[in-house]
Image: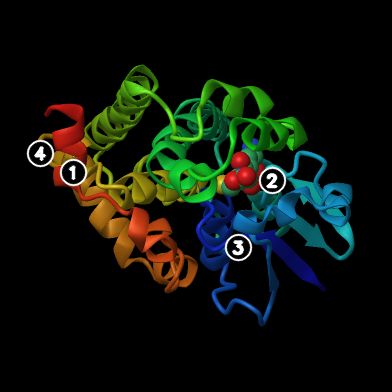
Amino acid sequence: MTIELYQAPQSTCSQKVRLTLAEKGMPEMNKDWIERDVDLGKFEQLEPDYLKLNPNGVVPTFVHDGTVLIESSAIMEYLEEVFPDPPLAPSDPVERARMRAWMRYIDEVPTVAVRVPTFANMLAPMRFAKSSDAEFADHAERLPLRKQFYQRMSQKGFGKAELEYAEFQIRQTCERIDAAIRDNGGPWIMGEQYTLVDAQVTPLIDRMDDLGYAFLWEDDLPEMTAWLARIRERPSFAAAFYPGARISERYPDFYRTAADLKAERGY
Ligand SMILES: N[C@@H](CCC(=O)N[C@@H](CS)C(=O)NCC(=O)O)C(=O)O
């Protein structure tokens, strides 16, 4: 069996798959599966050879015995079906449907929202601050999926209204996690069983924490805060978030503390 994961250490979508693989008992990166790093800063995701694998020009791409799969949550569900032990999905069909409802929500709301502060605080200043308007526009034209996303953003990142909406969406996600655990008794989002939902949302919350946004949950969402601490104690977390996996480690010059963010945002 050969498994290849085209990925980037700091990519949240790659981290979702790395966590799932680690939970499935494949914690030793480069042994049971092969990590192929795609340098997003050098735009390797837009190279013709990579676009043949993933026409969306994003990571991750998963290759299992030569079969190419894209989309992180589809890859996670595939891993659950092909490697069912240990299970990361409930056996009851109703509960499985509820798990998928969570997963669609995570794809639609926090996954999209996290891109806004990520680009505003880190990637736009890091990649494009010195680009001319024409260079920036040319780059946007090359993107199979994100042309309009880039066009809504300037070289300096997003404006206040976009950031505020993204913060609202992340806060909503945190409130839903907190309420779910309060209602079902935890310790995980769906109750006693750690599921794909926990793996899928973890990188998004970790990213927000890394960008200095823990103030969105840590003051008044105790269940969610305790869930995050438990998540970080799992061996899968250490396996997936190896040194260099955080955006603040890769781009320390662009890192802003929570105090900086609060000052900028007038909190
Ligand atoms: N829906 C896709 C989204 C993948 C995605 O957006 N990947 C990001 C990294 S997390 C990427 O490759 N971005 C390209 C870039 O930064 O230019 C998935 O879940 O796999």
Q: Nearer the viewer, mark 1 or mark 3?
A: 1
Q: Are marks 1 and 4 in contact (CB under 8 Å)?
A: no
Residue 157: image x %, image y %?
44, 33
Q: Nearer the viewer, residue 121 or 156?
A: 156
Q: Which mark is residue 260?
A: 1
Q: Secondary structure at mark 2?
A: loop
User: Alpha carbon of mark 4 to alpha carbon of mark 3: how far?
Assistant: 37 Å
Q: Secondary structure at mark 1?
A: helix
Q: Amino acid at mark 4?
A: Asp
- How crowded pointer 2 is (Cα within 10 Å; few <14, some 14-19, many 20+) is rated as many
Residue at image location 44% in from the left, 44% down from the top: 125
Q: Quadrant of the C terminus?
A: top left
Q: Earlier in the sequence, mark 1 or mark 2?
A: 2
Q: Earlier in the sequence, mark 1 or mark 4?
A: 4
Q: Which mark is residue 58?
A: 2
Q: Quadrant of the N terminus?
A: bottom right
Q: Which mark is residue 236?
A: none
Q: Amino acid at mark 1?
A: Asp
Q: Nearer the viewer, mark 2 or mark 3?
A: 2
Name the outermost residue toward the top: 161
Circle 4 is placed at which residue position? 219
User: Alpha carbon of mark 1 to alpha carbon of mark 3: how far?
Assistant: 44 Å
Residue 240 showing in the rendered view: yes
Q: Nearer the viewer, mark 1 or mark 4?
A: 1
Q: Amino acid at mark 2?
A: Val
User: Alpha carbon of mark 1 to alpha carbon of mark 4: how far?
Assistant: 18 Å
Circle 3 is placed at which residue position? 85
Q: Secondary structure at mark 4?
A: loop
Vertical comparison of 175 with 226: above or below? above
